[in-house]
Amino acid sequence: MASLFSGRVLIRNNSDQDELDTEAELSRRLDNRLVLLFFGAGSCPQCQAFAPILRDFFIRLTDEFYVLRAAQLALVYVSQDTTEEQQDLFLKDMPKKWLFLPFEDDLRR
């Protein structure tokens, strides 16, 4: 799955919005993991309804209290938002371990 993002930048959904921009960083975060791709938008009612369920699911499956191999799951949010501000607003309540494509990345479409 890491090869899908080869030559691209993924951003961590943390306060610093750290960029994973080298093949080694992407490989470390995505290789040998179950990678979930979440295509959504903050303006979409179905996405708004599904996001809390997905957030809780992701948190439980990445918490070593609940799961033996918690580090084997990664999630990449592929924004369908019309503005970067909408994307940022949607992501602010999502887990900090989520990754996302930069708004200007053409792979989002």
Image (cartoon, rainbow, N blue to C red):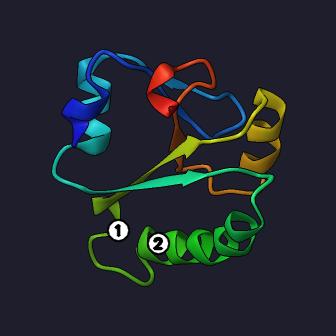
Q: Which residue is mark 2?
A: 63
**Within the image, what quadrant is residue 28 found in?**
top left
Quadrant in which residue 103 is drawn: top right
Secondary structure of residue under mark 2: loop
Q: Amino acid at mark 2?
A: Asp
Query: As drawn, is 25 to the left or to the right of 101?
Result: left
Residue at horizontal 70%, vertical 70%? 46
Query: In front here: 6 or 21?
Result: 6
Disc 1 residue type?
Ala
- Residue for badge 1: 70
- Residue 45 in picture, x, y percent from top left: 78, 67
Distance between the Cα atoms at labels 1 and 2? 6 Å
Q: Nearer the viewer, residue 49 or 74?
A: 49
Q: Are marks 1 and 2 in contact (CB under 8 Å)?
A: yes
Q: Is residue 56 above or below residue 31?
A: below
Q: Position of residue 16 (x, y in %)?
A: 68, 28
